[in-house]
Image (cartoon, rainbow, N blue to C red):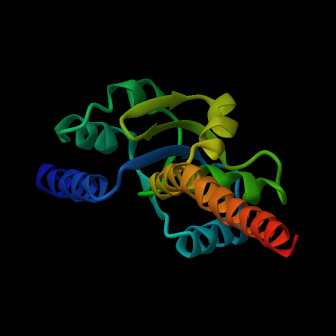
Amino acid sequence: MKKEDKAQVIEMIGNTLSQYSCVYLVQTQGLNAEKTSELRRACFKGDIKMLCVKNTLLKEAFKNSELDYSGLYDLLHGETTLLLSNTGNAPAKLIKNFRKKDDTLPMLKGAFVEESVYVGEGQLEALANIKSKNELIADVVALLQSPAKNVISALQSGGNKLHGILETLSNK
């Protein structure tokens, strides 16, 4: 590959990386064509971009990026597939669901999620349990609404009790 072509590919990878907040490095070597197509379809349905890239070009794109991907440099060996998403736990959930059919592949090498680096297969469960930004906002809103609902409920039930007591006293 010519130097100009490499520079274009590195720039293309860098532009793609800048569009996503979560980067997963996955090993898919060993998947046959049918399984690979199935994985690509699952990624498309889950709004996850799947790219197969050369490690040297990916490392250069990481170095040219504004974000610090240096924690992932040691993982760039062998075959590498990128799973890119803006939802932190979506690729991890996809990998877990895909493994229900084939329990070994794809294997997680590492991930860069919301400026945190996760290394190794053992981090898959932790990544799958990470809540997305929207889920966290929903939790905070629910927590904020809870005391207000309790006050309204107490006022409504107290009003009914008070009304009943006054009615009883007036009848006597």
* Corner quadrant of residue 35: bottom right
Residue 125's place in the image compared with 150, above or below, is above
Numbered label tally:
0
Residue 34, horizontal then vertical, whole percent: 71, 71
- Horizontal side of residue 27 vs 140, given as left or right: right
Q: Residue at x 39, y 25 (%)?
A: 71
Q: In this rendering, does residue 47 appear at all?
A: yes
* Corner quadrant of residue 135: bottom right
Residue 159, horizontal then vertical, whole percent: 68, 65
User: In the current view of this chain or complex, which residue is farthest to the right?
Assistant: 172
- Horizontal side of residue 161 vs 106, given as left or right: right
Residue 87, horizontal then vertical, whole percent: 47, 56
The residue nearer to you, when weighing 130 against 35, is 130
Residue 71's place in the image compared with 146, above or below, is above
Residue 30's place in the image compared with 73, above or below, is below
Residue 52, horizontal then vertical, whole percent: 46, 56
User: In the current view of this chain or complex, which residue is farthest to the left?
Assistant: 4
Residue 40's place in the image compared with 65, above or below, is below
Q: Residue at x 78, y 45 (%)?
A: 104
* Corner quadrant of residue 115: top left
The residue nearer to you, when weighing 21 against 40, is 21
> Which part of the image, by quadrant, shows the C terminus?
bottom right
The residue nearer to you, when weighing 66 against 159, is 159
Q: Residue at x 24, y 37 (%)?
A: 67
The residue nearer to you, when weighing 136 against 61, is 136
Q: In this rendering, does residue 82 appear at all?
A: no
Q: Residue at x 59, y 54 (%)?
A: 151
User: In the current view of this chain or complex, which residue is farthest to the front?
Assistant: 172
- Horizontal side of residue 155 vs 105, given as left or right: left
